[in-house]
Image (cartoon, rainbow, N blue to C red):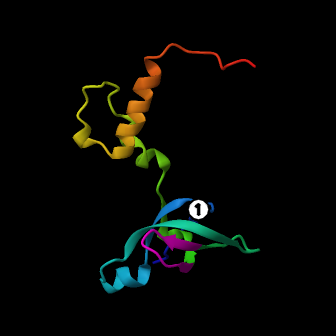
Amino acid sequence: MRLQTTARQAAVFQRHDFVLYRDPVKFWRGEQGHTFVCRISYVDQYTNGDRRYTLAPLTGGVVRDVQGDYLRLLPAIDAMRDIDTAPLATDMVADDMTAAAVAWLTQQHATANRPPQLPAHD
């Protein structure tokens, strides 16, 4: 029986991207704490096209020499979804929203109810 292999497309991450990292050693050993959120602090690009990443976990510390296969991008759209989908009404239920979402909506409501003004002219 002949095994077929397929070339996989390696994901490319940029410096300052937020990613979810899974430590493969901890994962395969069944240890807890194997998956956590990090920010990419450095990207090594090798002549063969390989990329390795240095990560800054949000809990502190540094993780070096990470393969992109063990990273998943955490897009900004996911972090901002509660703001993007929140109702734009003053009688909204703020208990279900983060403080940042409430502050943003309050600001939007205040500016939406004001007539547009030209900047002061000297």
Task: Judge whether 105 appears above or below 30 on screen.
Answer: above
Residue 4 visible to an observer of this rendering: no
Position of the C terminus, as image quadrant, is: top right
Q: Residue at x 59, y 15 (%)?
A: 117
How many numbered markers are drawn?
1
- Magenta extent: 54-64
Residue 37: % across, % down: 43, 66
Position of the N terminus, as image quadrant, is: bottom left
Residue at which label 1 appears? 9
Q: Residue at x 63, y 62 (%)?
A: 15
Q: Residue at x 73, y 74 (%)?
A: 48
**Could you tell me the amino acid type at mark 1?**
Gln
Q: Residue at x 37, y 77 (%)?
A: 34
Nearer to the camera, 31 or 79:
79
Nearer to the camera, 51 or 111:
111
Task: Judge whether 24 appears above or below 116 on screen.
Answer: below
Residue 56 visible to an observer of this rendering: yes
Task: Judge whether 48 appears above or below 116 on screen.
Answer: below
Residue 62: % across, % down: 52, 78
